[in-house]
Each structure stands twice: as structure tokens, then as C-alpha cells.
């Protein structure tokens, strides 16, 4: 009776098909991450460059020039100083920008990420579509 109980013990673990499925999912997520991370890093550089441009410029033209100088050193390719929305306020200028980054995936499929940043404390409003 004791031998029979040992022989009927069910095996636990991952089958080969299950293992391959997990590997494919991990690979897809890794490729997706490698395509998304550079856009997030660029967004962080844009956010920092906008803050520095606001601190270094006293006119809209100086702000744009300051941003463009930082653009070349921070590897920012999605936007330029001309894309900045510079709004005069009582305390100086508020700078904002909104752009989208399209990441091609496979064939006709692509991922579109909307980025927006502003030096003001209130979030940017979404335009009606």
C-alpha cells in the first residue's frame, strides 16, 4: 500500500510549453520596455531643460534659445524651442509643451504616448477631440 501511494505522487513544476509561453511573454515585455524607456528618459530631459530655460531666460526668445542649447547636449529630438508655449504671468513666464511620441512595434501596430509638461502648478488641459 505504501509503494502505491509513492507511485501516484503528482509531479509539480512547469511544462516545456508553459516555460516557452513564459519566455515569450518576458521577451515581448523586454522589447516593449527597451522601446519605451528612451522616450521616458527624453521626457525627463525635456522637463529639466524647461525648468532650466525658465530660470535662465527673461524673455521668450531667451527662453527658447536656452532650451535649444540644452536640447543639443541632452539628446532631445522630439521638440525644439519653437514648440514651447510661453505664457506671460505676473511673476515671469510659464512654459508648457505637449507632444506625442509614436513607437512602431510590429507591422502596422504602433504605440502612441502623449507627454505634457508645464512649469505651472496646474496641469495642462486636454483639448476637445
Image (tube, grey):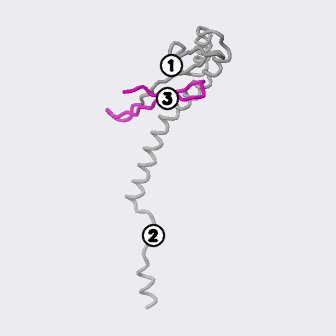
Q: Residue at x 60, y 28 (%)?
A: 121
- Indicate yes or no whether the magenta region holds residue 128: yes
Q: Which residue is nearer to you in this view: 67 or 84?
A: 84
Q: Which residue is mark 2?
A: 12
Q: Which residue is mark 1?
A: 79
Q: Crowding near pointer 1: few (<14 within 10 Å), some, many (20+)?
A: some
Q: Residue furthest bottom?
A: 1
- Between the residue at mark 3 and the residue at mark 1, the CA separation in whole angstroms equals 11 Å
Looking at the rendered image, the disc whose residue lies closer to the viewer, 3 or 1, is 3
Label 3 or label 2, whichever comes before in sequence order: 2
- Indicate yes or no whether the magenta region holds residue 89: no
Q: Is residue 75 above or below residue 18?
A: above
Q: Position of residue 2 (x, y in %)?
A: 46, 89
Q: Residue at x 68, y 14 (%)?
A: 56
Q: Residue furthest left?
A: 108
Q: Which residue is mark 3?
A: 115
Amino acid at each position: 500500500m505504501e509503494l502505491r501511494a509513492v507511485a501516484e505522487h503528482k509531479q509539480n513544476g512547469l511544462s516545456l510549453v508553459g516555460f516557452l509561453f513564459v519566455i515569450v511573454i518576458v521577451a515581448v515585455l523586454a522589447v516593449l520596455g527597451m522601446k519605451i524607456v528612451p522616450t521616458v528618459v527624453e521626457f525627463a530631459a525635456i522637463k529639466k531643460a524647461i525648468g532650466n530655460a525658465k530660470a535662465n531666460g527673461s524673455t521668450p526668445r531667451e527662453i527658447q534659445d536656452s532650451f535649444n542649447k540644452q536640447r543639443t547636449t541632452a539628446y532631445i529630438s522630439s521638440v525644439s524651442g519653437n514648440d514651447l508655449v510661453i505664457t506671460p504671468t505676473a511673476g515671469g513666464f510659464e512654459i508648457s509643451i505637449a507632444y506625442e511620441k509614436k513607437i512602431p512595434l510590429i507591422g502596422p501596430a504602433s504605440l502612441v504616448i502623449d507627454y505634457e509638461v508645464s512649469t505651472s502648478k496646474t496641469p495642462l488641459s486636454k483639448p476637445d477631440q
